[in-house]
Amino acid sequence: MKHRQHHAPGYIKENCVQNNNSSVHARVAEGAYRIRRFALQMGEVQGQGYVGQALGYADVLATAYCHALNLRPEDPGWEGRDRFLLSHGHYAIAFYAALIEAKVIPEDELETYGSDDSRLPMSGMATYTPGMEMSGGSLGQGCRLPWAWRSAYG
């Protein structure tokens, strides 16, 4: 198993919060607050959505996207990126909010959530959404896919 240095060149550590003086805890807490706010705004656009999941999952996503993941918001397909594999299709609204918080998707796009021409469909689709590594689907697929992904891309 090859080991990649966690903070590779080009990695943007403060991709969520611009205040470089804030502690990790504060950066994650502020990111989780904004993820919740973005999710609520998207739910309001459609008048529906799995907002409860977004509110509960915001801390997990903020920890990943505001602290732990190597990524380049301007280049979501960067080969050196860490991948967040979200198998819960119903958590897409939370995931989109995290991608907006991480600046992978522009904030003004949240107004398009769920519309026919949107890159933010109601259920997560990797073919439409930059930064989404896999489409959500059958429950339990998330247990198998990371293993297959690791075997294929090592």
Image: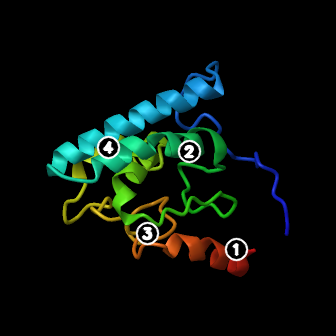
Residue receiving disc 2: 65
Mark 3 → mark 2, Cα distance in angstroms: 17 Å
Residue at position x 42%, y 52% from top? 95
Is 55 situated above or below 120?
Answer: above
| Residue type beneath disc 4 | Ala
Q: Earlier in the sequence, mark 1 or mark 2?
A: 2
Q: CA distance from mark 1 to mark 2?
A: 21 Å
Cα distance in 3D space between marks 3 and 4: 19 Å
Q: Type of residue at label 1?
A: Arg
Position in image of residue 128 (x %, y %):
37, 67
Q: Residue at x 65, y 44 (%)?
A: 68
Query: Residue type at mark 3?
Result: Ala
- Identify the element where label 2 is drawn: helix
Q: Are marks 3 and 4 in contact (CB under 8 Å)?
A: no
Mark 4: secondary structure: helix
Q: Which mark is residue 39?
A: 4
Under mark 2, the amino acid is Tyr
Question: Looking at the image, is mark 4 or mark 1 earlier in the sequence?
Answer: 4
Q: Any mark on residue 126, and which?
A: 3
- Residue 56: x and y in percent read 40, 43
Q: With 62 as the anchor, is 108 left or right in this view?
A: left
Name the residue carrying label 1.
Answer: 150
* Dot label at residue 56: none
Up-down: is 104 above or below 134? above
Residue 19: image location, x then y, percent: 57, 22
Mark toward the viewer: 1 or 3: 1
Mark found first going from the N terminus, 3 or 2:
2
Q: The N terminus is located in which quarter?
A: bottom right
